[in-house]
């Protein structure tokens, strides 16, 4: 007898679980469609980068694999292309199939990570026939009516006390809300003042100003004397362990990208050299001593320059921001050759890939210049 009860319980569990497959498959399909759309955008971006360099996709990925950092990016791109190809070829068939068809086709659109996320957020479905729904509705109405009658008689004293407690709780909630609103209004008055200025487009084709800036290693650099191709990025503050950023720093767009931007150029040394960039310079208003600490801590393989008066930013009208009446230079990147700006990058949304995106921008500028010369 006990074994039959256990077997029956297992049978009910299996039936309940498998009955959820149609709804699970539908929710999985919705997430799968979103992932395919995302992968399509990523593949399109890869193809756009290849087209900008007048390469096929395969040539672009082969060229990108020329460096260690590029090889990692190429492997990631190839993986995304493979997943997109497999899923995009099967999703339409999976979408149009019946529940039984989806069960047999599930392996074609299988994605373990996506399935796990779908399962963690899964909302169970309750399978109902018309007859079952009718009986369930009738049973619910009968049971609800009987219970309401009994509770109406026995629960009146409890409901009276409950209404009184609810009214008191509502009054207390209104008082707390009034206090929170007053505190919020005070906080609004304390929000930092942020203002943006400068235009990266103004730097294009402009000459580098004749500035001599102190470097973190004790030397000095004259920007106007640099004729070889050089990449120059600006950052407001590289930060220092144990030293807090100014109040409201998190309210400024991209202000916290400084360290990631500096590391991006550190890690892209081979890629920059292969593209003809002979030197990298980082410019900040911080003192040379602070820049020396940052260069040592981040193991930077290039020079950091101190520009406390932000003379470079003002000369080229590079993007800047004002936080509580204090002016800072915003993260941006330029490439100069022969003392003139050839390419510029701002805003720097994805700081870890800034160096790679700058090279694409530089190649686009060179191609445009060649086309103008041919025309």
Image (cartoon, grey):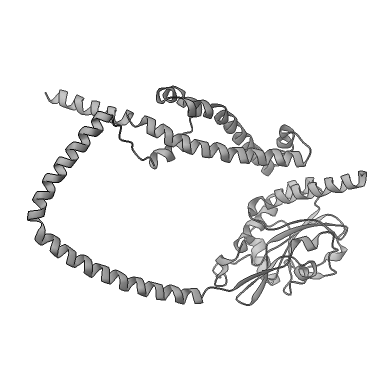
Quarter of the image for the C terminus: give it. Answer: top right
Residue 19: tell me if it is visible: yes
Residue 328 in the image, given as x and y percentages of width and height: 67, 70
Seen in the image, is 35 located left or right of residue 43? left
The answer to which of 239 and 120 lies nearer the viewer is: 120
- Residue drawn at x 63%, y 34% is 78
- Residue drawn at x 77%, y 72% is 311
Residue 52 in the image, given as x and y percentages of width and height: 76, 42
Which corner quadrant of the image does residue 235 belong to?
bottom right
The answer to which of 75 and 26 lies nearer the viewer is: 26
- Residue drawn at x 66%, y 67% is 236
Residue 288 in the image, given as x and y percentages of width and height: 70, 70
Residue 133 in the image, given as x and y percentages of width and height: 25, 33
Specify the farthest residue to the right: 374
Seen in the image, is 291 located left or right of residue 225? left
Please say if 43 is above or below 309. Answer: above
């Amino acid at each position: 007898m006990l074994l039959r009860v256990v077997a029956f319980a297992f049978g009910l569990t299996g039936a309940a679980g498998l009955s959820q497959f149609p709804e699970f498959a539908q929710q999985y399909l919705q997430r799968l469609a979103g992932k395919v759309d995302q992968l399509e955008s990523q593949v399109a971006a890869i193809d756009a980068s290849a087209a900008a360099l007048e390469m096929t996709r395969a040539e672009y990925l082969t060229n990108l694999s020329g460096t260690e950092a590029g090889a990692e990016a190429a492997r990631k791109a190839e993986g995304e292309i493979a997943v997109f190809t497999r899923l995009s070829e099967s999703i339409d068939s999976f979408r149009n199939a019946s529940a039984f068809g989806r069960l047999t086709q599930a392996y074609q659109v299988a994605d373990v990570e996506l399935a796990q996320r779908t399962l963690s957020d899964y909302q169970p479905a309750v399978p109902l026939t018309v007859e079952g729904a009718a009986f369930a509705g009738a049973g619910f109405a009968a049971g609800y009516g009987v219970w309401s009658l009994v509770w109406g008689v026995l629960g009146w004293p409890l409901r009276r006390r409950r209404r009184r407690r609810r009214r008191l709780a509502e009054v207390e909630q209104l008082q707390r809300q009034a206090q929170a609103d007053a505190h919020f209004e005070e906080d609004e008055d304390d929000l930092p003042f942020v203002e943006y200025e400068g235009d990266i487009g103004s730097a294009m084709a402009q000459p580098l100003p004749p500035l001599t800036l102190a470097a973190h290693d004790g030397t000095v650099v004259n920007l106007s004397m640099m004729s070889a191709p050089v990449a120059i990025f600006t950052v407001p503050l590289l930060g220092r362990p144990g030293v807090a950023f100014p109040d409201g720093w998190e309210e400024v767009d991209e202000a916290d990208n400084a360290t990631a931007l500096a590391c991006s150029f550190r890690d892209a040394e081979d890629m920059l050299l292969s593209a003809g960039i002979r030197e990298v310079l980082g410019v900040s208003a911080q003192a040379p001593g602070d820049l020396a600490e940052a260069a040592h801590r981040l193991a930077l393989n290039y020079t950091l320059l101190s520009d406390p008066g932000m003379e470079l930013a003002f000369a080229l009208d590079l993007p800047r921001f004002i936080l509580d009446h204090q002016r800072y230079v915003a993260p941006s990147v330029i490439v100069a050759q022969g003392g003139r700006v050839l390419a510029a990058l701002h805003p720097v949304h994805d700081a870890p890939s800034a160096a790679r995106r700058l090279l694409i921008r530089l190649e686009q500028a060179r191609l445009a210049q060649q086309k103008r010369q041919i025309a």
